[in-house]
Amino acid sequence: MAKWGEGDPRWIVEDRPDATNVNNWHWVEKNATQWSKDKLTELLVGLTIENDQLRCDIKELKKCDGEASANNRKAK
């Protein structure tokens, strides 16, 4: 661990009042909303669930609300 003031100059989040993630040095956040909607559609449409008393066929995904994101910290 570097002493205060002796660290890599790219470690500038501490010095910024807004804590901006400059050049994605500390973390990367990617929007995964559309990928998630596509994946849910792929997995659910055409699925049949049944037991002795009933049967459920999923024919379409009409609505999918919300957000999804993928986070990566320092490429780990």
Image (cartoon, grey):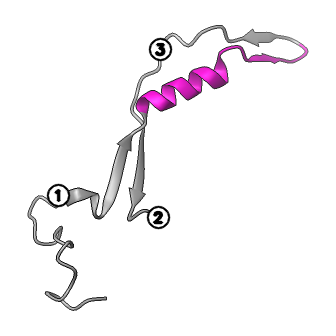
Check disc 3 and report the residue beneath it.
Answer: 63
Name the residue at 65% across, 8% down: 59
Residue 31 belongs to the span the image colors magenta: no
Check disc 1 and report the residue beneath it.
Answer: 20
Q: Amino acid at mark 1?
A: Thr
Nearer the observer, 23 or 59: 23
Spatial separation of the CA atoms under disc 2 and disc 1: 20 Å
Report how many numbered discs are placed on residues in the image: 3
Work out whether mark 2 precedes mark 3 in sequence or the reverse, and give the earlier one.
3
Q: Position of residue 36 (x, y in %)?
A: 50, 31
The local crowd at label 3, few if under 14, some if 14 to 19, many if 20 or more residues have their Cα within 10 Å, is: few
- Give the magenta range: 33-52
Name the residue at 39% across, 33% down: 67
**Quarter of the rendering occupied by the N terminus:** bottom left
Check disc 2 and report the residue beneath it.
Answer: 76
Q: Amino acid at mark 3?
A: Lys
Q: Amino acid at mark 2?
A: Lys
Q: Position of residue 14 (x, y in %)?
A: 16, 72
Q: Quadrant of residue 39?
A: top right
Magenta: main secondary structure equals helix
Name the residue at 65% across, 21% down: 44
